[in-house]
Amino acid sequence: MENKILGIHHITAIAGDAKRNFDFYTKVLGLRFIKRTVNFDDPHTYHFYFGDEQGHAGTILTFFPWGSSVRQGRRGAGMATEIGYAVPEGSFDFWINRFEEHHVTYNKPAQRFGESYLTFLDPDGLKLELVIPPAADNRKPYETAEVKAAAATRGFYNTTLTLNSIKATAAVLTDIFGYTLIGQEGNRYRYATDAVDTANIIDLVELPNENKGIGAGGTVHHIAFRVKDDATQMVFREKIAAAGLQITPQIDRNYFHSLYFREPGGVLFEIATENPGFTVDESLEELGKHLKLPPQYEPQRKKIEAHLVPLD
Ligand code: ZN
């Protein structure tokens, strides 16, 4: 399995107010805040990482909170439009009560591919789902005082991409990434890789007349697929370039190494390594506690901190 795409590594979205985003994901959803850093391409804005206790690949949702004046985005074609988290059987009552209590917008539970799911929106309008997988997801949940193991998210279950035509995107998944078509319901096509047991499903929804999405507040910026190491990553770089797609050189993101390319349907894909991980610059206990800057921005720490809103 080492030389394969190992499902999703992380998903990155755009938010507005940083404090509101932080409160929603740590308090309402009960995720662990695993890294407080800045956007490496724009160090005067935060980059937040939420995940399980250790920040395992497949649990990491990250945000660029661009501030409360952020333009509202719109879900549409050429975008990842839904993020699905696995939750335990019997947990929907807990979540519905919690959504009521915190004024979270949600839909009644529904069924798809024989699975129950519960759709909700974060404070910026980002669309997420809680899904009860057919077989229990055995990843160890992160628990908070209010969100215990009986309901806590286990990490990603699936991700949905909306496309005008699925053909070319499906070919990237099957011919390059090693995914297979495992089901279809209406215009939703489900692809999975058997290289891993979790965070391994991508749904493609085909809407020929859907307008292009607008990438701004409340939308997904990109989705990152996971590889074991740099050598595997370079093999995929070759394959993607050989398919005629433009791909970046390797970029050091401090916690992983990244390649980016836009798949033919318009969604920004990343390939990210497991190495070196989130404990490269702080201990497991201290994850998320302090603002961490990459070495190139350390000399500007005071100036950068002055631009960022406090969270605690
Ligand atoms: Zn990324």
Image: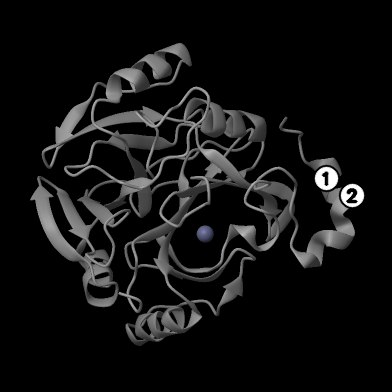
> What residue would you read off at disc 2?
302
Residue 278 visible (yes or no): yes
Does residue 57 appear left or right of residue 137 in this picture? right
Does residue 22 appear left or right of residue 183 in this picture? right
Q: What type is the residue that disc 2 sits on? A: Lys
Residue 13, position in %: x, y? 50, 47
Does residue 6 appear left or right of residue 222 in this picture? left
What is the quadrant of residue 71 in the picture?
A: top right
Q: Nearer the viewer, residue 133 or 68?
A: 133
Look at the image and tell me in which quarter the C terminus lies: top right
Q: Is residue 109 above or below residue 112?
A: above
Q: What type is the residue that disc 1 sits on? A: Glu
Q: Identify the element where label 1 is drawn.
A: helix
What is the quadrant of residue 84 in the picture?
A: top left
Mark 1, residues whose alpha carbon is within 10 Å: few (<14), some, or many (≥20)?
some
Residue at x 46%, y 55% (from the top left corner):
10
What is the quadrant of residue 244 in the picture?
A: bottom left
Q: Cβ–Cβ below 8 Å for labels 1 and 2?
A: yes
Mark 2, residues whose alpha carbon is within 10 Å: few (<14), some, or many (≥20)?
few
Q: Which mark is residue 220?
A: none
Residue 35, position in %: x, y? 63, 49
> What residue would you read off at disc 1?
305
Q: Identify the element where label 2 is drawn.
A: helix
Look at the image and tell me in which quarter the N terminus lies: bottom left
Residue at x 19%, y 28% (from the top left corner):
110
